[in-house]
Image (cartoon, rainbow, N blue to C red):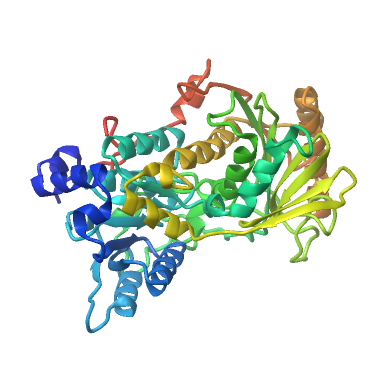
């Protein structure tokens, strides 16, 4: 099959003309006020189902958008989706191969909900094909390819929205404005929490057969095509480095993004380190189920916590930050005169230093609707979560994981000695120890890994003085699924 690259797409004169025309004018001035935006969903065995329902809700509310195609490397998933969405008056086309879908000039926008390792390449190829993109979080599998996504969006004048839907919450926006106005003083610490139980994924002694109906070459795409060494192909790819980023990049990207939003920083942190491990069971997962990431921003530290175990062995109840009425999957912003709790994707609660509620904000709009608005206006500035925002927040997850992966296990006393200069890091580590002890994990025998302390030049998005870390900002791509250096 012909490789999709920039030259292939630019040779298609009609496609190129359309891309340039749409970038300069509004959708309606080119296509007409009543013409539908034609959408395709790529990958819909998980988050893609929400994409489908989100687009359907927009159409039901009177918006001119409809799904005309679906794409998935699992034939069983694909056929079921096509059958479900097709009607007598509107047939939805199905594609196993994203490259064939992107050749279809009858598709205007694509939404990407594949595993993480496909996000960047799918988005770049779509931009080159003249399509606008809604890409799930994290937008990238590593730092370098996230920046390439931004470059592609700008070069081809594409509208690219990130699936961090909290950015469309007016309630959270209002809380950020409240803090910036100085009502509770300066921010002293931003904390993201991902306390989310994750059971063992099991352990296999021999490769698991690839399920029938799956084109494994397409499924692997940019990642190495190796035997499946876990029980389940779907979903558990999150916990393997070749395809996932752990819960830091799976769930935590939402809270990382909100924390960075409060801090008002638009670049990567100049210093990062991580502590953690995969505790409580032995399985085929590689990513940590317990982790601390410390981003040392000048404005205030951003600390992120991942906990995948319950609060005690055999319980389904998770820890909660600051007591049972506190937070588990959330953001906590501590200020000089109070705090902000963001407990979900739409609301924020302001409290004083004693924990008494001062004010509450709650309001949200459709994130898919915001994407459609920008597609129609042709203004990326209309986006609530432009791809640049998605890249930066995703990259904070990646740099934390780079530190962790370059680290070494050591006794708890050694860890404390090395981080003792960061009071908040020490306090967070002490609480992590309590969490592990409550789950029957002896931290003296199940030693945590202290990641490498990494310094970064935020302008170049490269680490300073650490070649091993810089190698992990990207990866070796499997041909022909190569993220291009020159988009």
Q: Determine if residue 289 is in view.
A: no
Name the residue located 64 percent from the left edge and 54 percent from the top edge: 171
| Vertical placement of residue 85 versus 311, above or below | below
> Which quarter of the figure is the C terminus placed in?
top left
Task: State the image coordinates of residue 182 (x, y, percent, origin top left).
Answer: 74, 35
Q: Determine if residue 384 is in view.
A: yes
Task: State the image coordinates of residue 237 (x, y, percent, origin top left).
Answer: 48, 54
Task: State the image coordinates of residue 435 (x, y, percent, origin top left).
Answer: 80, 49
Name the residue located 77 percent from the left edge and 65 percent from the top edge: 314
Name the residue located 75 percent from the left edge and 32 percent from the top edge: 186
Task: State the image coordinates of residue 340 (x, y, percent, origin top left).
Answer: 75, 46
Task: Please count the marks in the image.
Answer: 0
| Vertical placement of residue 85 versus 448, above or below | below
Name the residue located 73 percent from the left edge and 31 percent from the top edge: 410
Left or right, 223 with respect to 126, comes to right
Left or right, 178 with respect to 2, comes to right
Q: Most extreme residue toward the top, as rendered?
A: 465
Q: Quadrant of residue 66?
A: bottom left
Between residue 234 and residue 85, name the one nearer to us: 85
């Amino acid at each position: 099959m012909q490789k999709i690259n920039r030259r292939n797409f630019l040779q298609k004169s009609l496609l190129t003309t359309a891309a340039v025309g749409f970038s300069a004018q509004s959708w309606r001035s080119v296509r007409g006020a009543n013409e539908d935006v034609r959408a395709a969903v790529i990958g819909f065995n998980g988050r893609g189902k929400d994409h489908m329902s989100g687009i359907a809700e927009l159409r039901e509310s009177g918006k001119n958008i409809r799904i005309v195609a679906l794409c998935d490397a699992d034939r069983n998933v694909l056929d079921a989706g096509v059958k479900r969405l097709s009607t007598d008056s509107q047939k939805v086309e199905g594609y196993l191969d994203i490259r064939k879908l992107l050749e279809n000039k009858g598709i205007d926008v694509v939404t990407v909900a594949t595993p993480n390792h496909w996000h960047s390449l799918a988005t770049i190829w779509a931009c080159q094909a003249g399509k606008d993109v809604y890409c799930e979080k994290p937008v990238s599998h590593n730092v370098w390819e996230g920046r390439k996504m931004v470059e592609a969006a700008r070069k081809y004048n594409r509208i690219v929205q990130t699936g961090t839907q909290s950015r469309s919450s007016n309630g959270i926006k209002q809380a950020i404005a409240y803090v910036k106005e100085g009502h509770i003083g300066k921010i002293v610490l931003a904390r993201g929490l991902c306390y989310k139980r994750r059971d063992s994924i099991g352990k296999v002694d021999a490769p698991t057969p690839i399920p029938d109906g799956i084109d494994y070459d397409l499924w692997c795409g940019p990642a190495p095509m190796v035997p499946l060494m876990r029980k389940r192909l779907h979903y558990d790819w999150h916990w393997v480095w070749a395809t996932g980023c752990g819960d830091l990049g799976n769930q935590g990207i939402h809270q990382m993004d909100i924390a960075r939003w409060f801090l008002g920083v638009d670049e990567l942190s100049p210093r990062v380190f991580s502590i953690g491990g995969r505790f409580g069971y032995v399985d085929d997962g590689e990513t940590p189920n317990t982790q601390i990431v410390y981003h040392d921003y000048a404005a205030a530290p951003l600390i992120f916590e991942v906990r995948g175990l319950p609060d005690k062995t055999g319980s389904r109840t998770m820890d909660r930050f600051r007591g049972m009425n506190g937070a588990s999957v959330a953001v906590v912003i501590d200020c000089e005169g109070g705090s902000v709790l963001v407990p979900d994707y739409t609301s924020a609660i302001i409290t004083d230093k004693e924990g008494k509620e001062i004010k509450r904000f709650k309001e949200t709009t459709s994130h898919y609707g915001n994407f459609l608005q920008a597609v129609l206006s042709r203004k990326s500035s209309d986006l609530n979560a432009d791809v640049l925002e998605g890249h930066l927040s995703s990259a904070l997850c990646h740099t934390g994981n780079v530190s962790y992966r370059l680290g070494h296990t050591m006794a708890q006393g050694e860890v404390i000695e090395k981080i003792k200069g960061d009071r908040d890091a020490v306090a967070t580590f002490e609480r992590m120890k309590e969490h592990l002890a409550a789950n029957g994990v002896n931290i003296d025998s199940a030693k945590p890994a202290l990641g490498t302390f990494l310094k970064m030049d935020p302008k170049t998005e490269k680490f300073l003085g650490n070649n091993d870390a810089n190698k992990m900002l990207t990866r070796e791509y499997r041909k022909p699924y190569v993220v291009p250096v020159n988009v």
